Image (cartoon, rainbow, N blue to C red):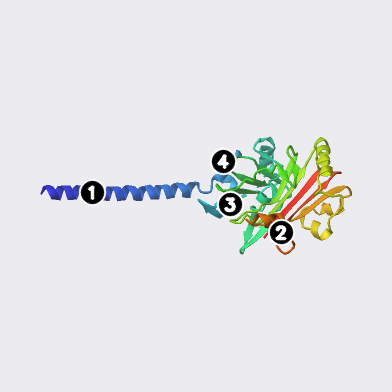
Amino acid sequence: MENKKIILYILLLLVSCIIVSFLSVEITKLYFSINRNTDYKKLGLEIDQNDIEYCTTYREDILDGKYKVYKLKNYYEGSMDNFKNQLEESNLWDKNKYYEYIMKEFSEIKDDSSIPIDREDLYYYNGKNVYAIFDLKHAKLYYYINRIFNNHEDYYEVLNLDIKNYISREIYDVRGGPQNDGRDYYVYNFTEEREKDIVQQLEQNQKWSRNKLDDDKLKNFEYNQEVLNISNGYYYYELICRTSDVRKKEIVTEETATGYEMGVYDTDNNTLYYYWESI
C-alpha cells in the first residue's frame, strides 16, 4: 500500500512537471507572438501600434538576428511631419549614413530578389548593436540586428601608411570567411593638416609613385570612379599571395598571386582610396 502511494506521488509529480513545462512554453510563445513586431519601441520614437500599417519580417533567428520592415500609416498630407520633428530632435537619429557594407543589409525582397532601398530621405539610428533606418519618403522603418555582426575594426596602418586620426572612413566591403578571402574596400578622408604628414610619408615610401595606375585597375573602385580623374595623386599597387609559405609571400609572381592590394591618394581632396582583393 505504501509503495502504491509513492508511485502515485511520483506520477502526480511528473504530470505536474509536464503541465508546468507545457504552460511555460505556451506562455513564452504567446509573449513573443505579442511582442515579436514591437522592436520599433526600442528606437526612441513615439510610435505605437496604431501607427503601423503592417510589418514584414524577412529574418528572425537567434543566430542570424532580425530583419524586418514596418510600413507606417501615411494616408494624409503631412502625416510624416511629426516623425520628422522627432528624428531631427533625437540624439539617437541623424542623417549620417552607415558604412556601405552595413547598408547592403537593407533591402526590399520580392520574389527572392533583393531590391536596394531608395536612399533619398533617410535617417539613421545610432543605438548600440541595432541598425535602423527611417524612410520618410516611403513611410517605412527598417530594423536590423545581428548579435554576431562584425563591426569592422579600424586599420591603423594600410599600404605602409600611418592613417590614424582620419575625419571619416567609408567601408564598401570587408573580407571574411574561413580563409579571410574576398575584398577590403575603404575610403578615408583627412584634414589639410594631416594631409601634409601623409604626403611626407608617401614621398619617403618607395612603394608609392606619382605614376598613375592603368584605368583597368582603377575601375575596381566601383563606388568611387572619381579616382580616374585625379590630377595630383600618389599610387600603390602590389600583388599578394594568400599562403602560409613565407617565401611565396615575399616573392609573389603573376602565377603565384591570389590577388592584389592597391591604393590611391588624392592630394587635392585629402582622400585615400584602399582596395585589397584575394580569391
Calculate the distance from the C-alpha at mark 2 to the C-alpha at mark 1. 68 Å
Q: Which mark is residue 12?
A: 1
**Which quadrant would the C terminus be assigned to in this image?**
bottom right
Q: Work out whether mark 4 precedes mark 3 in sequence or the reverse, and give the earlier one.
A: 4
Residue 68 numbered mark, or none: 3
The residue furthest left is 1
Q: Residue 256, can we see it?
A: yes
**Could you give the CA–CA distance between mark 2 and mark 4, rounded to whole angstroms?**
43 Å
Q: Quick one: label 2 or label 1, which is nearer the N terminus? A: 1
Closer to the observer: label 2 or label 1? 2
| Residue drawn at x 62%, y 49% as measured from the top left | 142
What amino acid does circle 4 point to? Lys
Looking at numbered disc 1 in the image, what kind of residue is underneath it? Leu
What is the secondary structure assignment of the residue under circle 3?
Answer: strand
In the image, taking residue 105 as reference, residue 202 lies left or right, namely: right
Q: Residue at x 72, y 64 (%)?
A: 255
Judge by depth and name the residue closer to the eye, 99 or 13: 99
Residue 278 placement (x, y as % from top left): 68, 58
Point out which mark residue 193 bears. none
Residue 42 disc label: 4
Between 254 and 152, the one nearer to me in the picture: 254
Question: Which badge, 1 or 3, is on the more N-terminal residue?
Answer: 1
- The earlier-in-sequence mark between 1 and 4 is 1
Residue located beneath label 2 in the image: 259
CB of mark 2 within 8 Å of CB of mark 1? Answer: no
The secondary element bearing badge 4 is classed as: helix
- 71 or 183: which is nearer to us? 183
Q: Quadrant of residue 92?
A: top right
C-alpha gap between disc 2 and disc 3: 37 Å
Q: What x and y, as percent, mark residue 107?
A: 65, 55
Q: What secondary structure is marked by label 1?
A: helix
Give x and y (percent) for residue 24: 37, 47
